[in-house]
Image: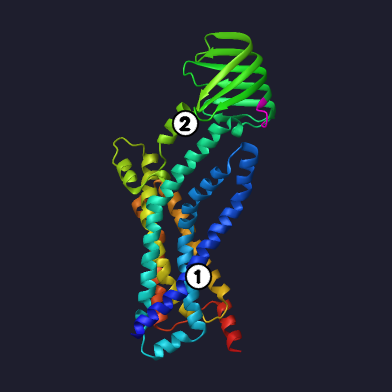
Amino acid sequence: MRIKILFRYLIEEIYPIFGVILFVSIFIVITTKMLSLIEMVVSHGASASHVIKILLFVIPEVLLFSLPAATLISVLIAFLRLSSDNEIIALKASGISLYQILPPVLTFSVAAALLSFFISAYLVPWGNRNLREILFQIIKAKADIGIKERVFCEPFKDILFYVNHFSSNQGIMKGVFVVDKRDKNEISTIVAEKAEIASWPKKGTIIFHFSKGTIFTVDKDYSFLRTIEFQTYDLNLNLNNIGRPYLLKKKPKEMGIKELIQELKKKNMPEIKYNLAIIELMERLSLPVAVFLMGIIGAPLGMQIKAKNRSLGVGIGLLVFVIYYICLAGAKSICETGIIPPFIGMWIPDIFLATACIYFLRSSQKDKQISFVFIKDNAHKDIG
């Protein structure tokens, strides 16, 4: 009976902190992205519904990034509070061992790991795919999104723009220089005094209406040059034809686990693409394990810190989290070079966490305190 009470007591300590950390993480990311989203609305004609959808599609990536830290810090702070109030000592005095305290932590860690797997396997690919689709729709609705004054830019594949003056509100460009490389046999260069933009978002069509200019056409071998002067000339772009192959060709981050496995089964696959696909797959599988281990580490780590300052627990949790992500980033870089096979290298951060987990559990079982100077000082202050 008392084990059930303890189970409920610990869960009620952990879950509120976990929820607050995830909420704060989402809030911070949304706040940092608001300026760029507002600029997209003001300058590029994105609607409020576009902004809401973009935020919705970004949230899975934020949750996945925050889950390891949230899992670790929530368990660590809960046990830090129990330890600082001497409740851990009381539990041990009543005959409850460390391993009898762990089941609530195990349950919570498993739930967090399953949530991490669901987000990484389904929500993140869904968010990345839809994010690219919504950005494509914005480009279709507002053709001038990538055109800048006095800057060589390529807002559409194989079409290079340079304009001296551009009024995005009126869609009028002055002093226009365009290089059209869409035709595999020849390159066309358009120089015009002025150009106007007209778009039909529903049809996915954009028309650049040039006035008073010259078209220079040269073949790939530079064997002939054709010059055409014009008063008016229309350059038609069908964004559905330009964008559809791009949208259909998914990147590894936009694929589900089954799609990644099918991709890896393809024959004669370039080594670089193969490495990127298997790195993504291994990361999807290793991250839930890391979340589980983070939760387990939090319990003995919190029990060994003798301090009433909860910010200390947050700091130590973030330190472990940062070390883990440094290891993960290093492992990904090494695996991309091919020095270490991805199915081995991507598990190195989890091996680090598993080793730390075993060490802290053994130290906590032997009632050893972590020997950090700043923690000792805090402990002495609390006693004094």
* Mark 2 surroundings: few (<14), some (14-19) or many (≥20) residues within 10 A: some
Amino acid carrying mark 1 in the image = Ile
Amino acid carrying mark 2 in the image = Gly
Q: Position of residue 325 (x, y in %)?
A: 48, 58
Residue 331 falls in which quadrant of the image? Answer: bottom left
172 relative to 114, above or below: above
- Judging by the rendered image, the residue that carries numbered circle 2 is 243
Is residue 71 visible to us here?
A: yes
Q: Is residue 3 left or right of residue 173?
A: left
Q: How many marks?
A: 2
60 or 356, which is in the foreground?
60
Q: Position of residue 252 (x, y in %)?
A: 40, 44
The mark found on residue 17 in the picture is 1
96 relative to 23, above or below: below
Q: Magenta-highlighted stretch: main secondary structure?
A: loop
Q: Position of residue 83 (x, y in %)?
A: 48, 82
Q: Position of residue 81 (x, y in %)?
A: 51, 79
Q: Which stretch appears magenta? A: 168-172
Q: Is residue 24 left or right of residue 79?
A: right
Residue 192 is inside the magenta segment: no
Residue at image point 67% right, 25% down: 172
Residue 170 is inside the magenta segment: yes
Q: Of helix, strand and loop, which one carries label 1?
A: helix
127 relative to 155, above or below: below
356 relative to 198, above or below: below
Please, which colouring scheme is shown? rainbow
Residue at image point 50% right, 50% down: 56
